[in-house]
Amino acid sequence: MKLPSITNYSNALPLDGITVVSLEQAIAAPFCTRQLADMGARVIKVERPEVGDFARAYDSRVNGMASHFVWTNRSKESLALDLKRPRDLSILKKILLRADVMVQNLAPGAAERLGLSHDELGKTNSGIIVCDISGYGSHGPYRDKKAYDLLVQSESGMLDVTGGKTEPAKTGISIADIAAGMYAYSNILAALLEREKTGRGRRIDISMLESMVEWMGFPMYYAFDGQPGPARAGASHATIYPYGPFETGDGASVMMGVQNEREWTILCRDVLGDAALAADERFATNILRSTNRVELKKIICACFSDLTADEVIEKLDKAGIANASVNDMQGVWNHPQLRARERWVEVKTPSGIVSGLLPPGVDDASRANIGEVPSVGQHNKSIMAEFGIQEEE
């Protein structure tokens, strides 16, 4: 299937005319600024000369490029500067005079030492919004601790509720980085709206820890006032059952969720073929089903043992019981719902065309800016010329 190529867009986008300068690396800040770029903002990505953002070297799975980098860096301009050199730092500050937003996730305190704090930049650009993204925030005893995604998952309690009974597990994606990136994105949008009213920018202080702890609201309240937290339950729900994966006769699994007594009765009668099971004293309430989940899973899997995953899903759909396929990555690439909704577009990269997803919430490819993934320093010449800066001989 031929995918639409969106390198230019004809309709005005929400962030047209907004210039973002980002001193970014890894995931949190690049993910934030990619959302801004998708909505029409001009994003100038400042990278180290030659090597660039270190996420460029994470792997080489996308035609020789890194998977993380391709995902988070489309639609940006790459400006290679060595900020340890006074000339390059002065170039950056000149560009920032005309910027609307600066985003940075450098090491704690690095931006301030370079004279790139909101207090300093605001002296010459009162409207600038500065978003600082760090592991633990700009002050407090953890301010200077290194904060990689897995470490913040651990600090935030995510590992306490994820995994199996005997061993915790990290999520398979950089969830702490993503959470911080999305809160940075939403706070920047709010700050732009605020600036329309006040005419002034402001500083935004985004902490990966605080972003993750916000997402931990359910297990934290579950453990309210010293009570034990939810037990790790693997791919099953910690407190609702049956809600999780169930093996089928063809060696696959089906994800199924029952949320109330009406659905439990229907599952027993129309899917499992045993209406009396709904009143079994071991399983009469969700609390009992969750407590006796090992026994209940054996009963359900025995009923599914003569069926394929597709046959089980067909029965569940017919009964109106929530379910899902347990997809691998190829299953997601080929997901019929994404194809039916035309969510895939072409993205240009230095190594050729790759597929990319339209931003969630955008239902028309003309309503997003899907530009190319840049090479290191690809836009140095054009940016220097725009700002009247002579390139070094």
Image: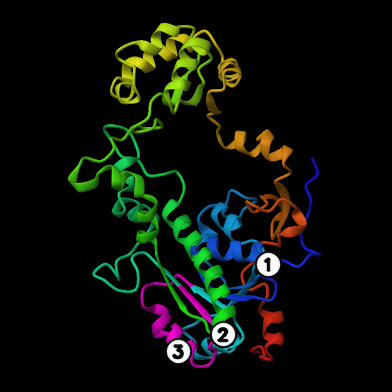
* Eye-nearest disc, 2 or 1: 2
Q: Which residue is mark 1?
A: 14
CB atoms of marks 3 and 2 within 8 Å: no
Q: Earlier in the sequence, mark 1 or mark 3?
A: 1
Asked whether residue 46 appears in the rendered view, the answer is no
Q: Amino acid at mark 2?
A: Gly
Q: Earlier in the sequence, mark 3 or mark 2?
A: 3
Give SS at disc 2.
loop
Q: Which residue is mark 2?
A: 199
Q: Nearer the viewer, residue 2 or 284?
A: 284
Which residues lie in the magenta part? 104-131
Q: CA distance from mark 3 to mark 2?
A: 17 Å
Which of the image's four quarters has the C terminus?
bottom right
- Residue 195, quarter of the rendered image: bottom right
Q: At 36% from the left edge and 11% from the top edge, which residue is drawn?
A: 279
Asked whether residue 99 appears in the rendered view, the answer is yes
Count up the numbered dots.
3
Q: Earlier in the sequence, mark 2 or mark 1?
A: 1
Q: At 71% from the left edge and 85% from the top edge, which residue is drawn?
A: 386
Q: Nearer the viewer, residue 349 or 305?
A: 305
Q: At 58% from the left edge and 48% from the top edge, which residue is drawn?
A: 61
Q: Amino acid at mark 3?
A: Glu
Q: Residues within 10 Å of mark 3 (few under 14, many from 20)?
A: few
CB atoms of marks 1 and 3 within 8 Å: no
Q: Which mark is residue 120?
A: 3
In the image: residue 97, left or right of residue 162: right
Q: CA distance from mark 2 to mark 1?
A: 18 Å
In the image: residue 134, left or right of residue 72: left
Give x and y (percent) for residue 344: 71, 46
Q: Residues within 10 Å of mark 2 (few under 14, many from 20)?
A: few
Q: Amino acid at mark 1?
A: Pro
